Every structure is written in structure tokens, then in C-alpha cells.
Amino acid sequence: MNIPSVQLPPIPEARPVRILFICLGNICRSPAAHGMMQALVDSRGLSDSFVIDSAGTGGYHIGSLPDSRMRAHARRRGLTLDHRCRQVSEADFSDFDIIIGMDASNVANLRRLAPTPEAMAKVIPMSAFFSIATRYDHVPDPYYEGAEGFELVLDLLDDATLNLLDTITAARH
Ligand code: 4NP
């Protein structure tokens, strides 16, 4: 693996790993990460070992499908994104083992929301799973960008989801 080792929070061995991806709106970046990670674990025959979801720190689009531009770009890579937007809540800190923010603002908002130090330790930036070679330190918000912005998000997530799976697999064996 070509990423620095990431300190994962403790994850019980006996049950699936529960991962929650977080961005601001839960209509672009986090539903794409969610759909991509689900497709990855499904393709490896690991569906029963993971529970994957996504949510937003904001509540502007609750109940909506992902942004039509993100759905179209994901579709071109064979991914169908059909998550319905929801807002993150304090209960998510007990319902999930790893809570991954797309950018520094998401991470700061999650840390403020975390009810305990153990909950705060579950919050990890997605950039922790970027390969060393990337020049990005976050997943940039594509909402006001063109097609390149959406492609960049998908490229970064492709890299990070693979490294995330490798990191979890290594930690559990
Ligand atoms: P996301 O992108 O956080 O990747 O889902 C955004 C979507 C919507 C808004 C901002 C960011 N918004 O302000 O409505």
C-alpha cells in the first residue's frame, strides 16, 4: 500500500464494519463515495462484512437523490447512485465505526457534533486514504464546478476507497 498508515478507531471483529461518508450536502461527494465503496466491497464478495451509508452536515436537500450531474458522471463509470439525502445526527456516532469527512470543514463540523472523545476518534478525513502521489488534501466540493470537478471527485474517491478497504482489511487480519 502506498499510503501512510492510518490509525483506525477500534472496530469489533464479530460484526460488519460500519462506514459513514459525510460531505456538506449529501448529494455529490458522500453519496458517490458511498456508492463506490459499496460497489467495491460487492465486487470483492465482501458485502456481508460492511454496512455503508452517507449523510450531510447540512440539511438543504433531505430526501433528494444525488445531484443529476454526479449521477451522470458516476453512471459513466458503471455506478448507479440512488441514495436519498439525509442529515448526520448524534445517533450516527453510535451506529457507525468510521465516519469519514470529505473536507476539513466536514471534519470540523463532525468533531463538534461528536458527543464523546470515543465518538470524535471515529472521525477521519477522506484524504487520509489518498495515495502519497496525489496533490490534493481534501475532496473538493464540485457543486459550483464543471464536469472536471465531478470527474476529479470520482478519481480521488476511486483511489481513496481502494486504500480504505486495504487499510481495514489489514487492520482486521
Ligand atoms: P456535496 O456538494 O457536499 O458534495 O453534496 C454540495 C451540494 C450542495 C450544496 C453544497 C455542496 N449546497 O449548498 O446546496
Image: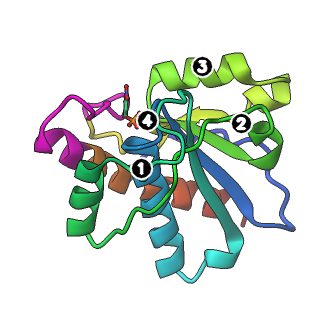
First along the sequence among labels 2 and 3: 3
| SS for dot 3 | helix
Placement of 128 over or under 115, stated as above or below? below
Mark 2–mark 4 CB contact (< 8 Å)? no
- Quick one: 148 or 156, which is closer to the camera? 148
Ligand 1 located in image quadrant:
top left
Q: Position of residue 88 (x, y in %)?
A: 65, 35
Magenta span includes 103: no
Residue for badge 4:
127
Q: Amino acid at mark 3?
A: Asn
User: Which is more N-terminal, label 3 or label 4?
Assistant: 3
- Answer above or below: position of 77 versus 24: below
Residue 32 image label: none
The residue where tag 2 is placed is 122
Mark 1 nearby-residue class (10 Å; few <14, some 14–19, many ≥20): many
| Disc on res. 109 | 3
Using residue 114 as the reference point, say whether residue 3 is left or right of it. Answer: left
Q: CA distance from mark 1 to mark 2?
A: 17 Å
Nearer-N-terminus badge (1/3): 3
Q: CA distance from mark 4 to mark 1?
A: 7 Å
- The kind of residue tagged 2 is Lys
Which residue range is magenta in the image? 135-152
Q: Reading the chain from its start, which is encountered first: label 1 or label 2? A: 2
Instruction: Classify the position of the C terminus by image quarter.
Output: bottom right
Q: Residue at x 64, y 25 (%)?
A: 110
Residue with the mark numbered 1: 160
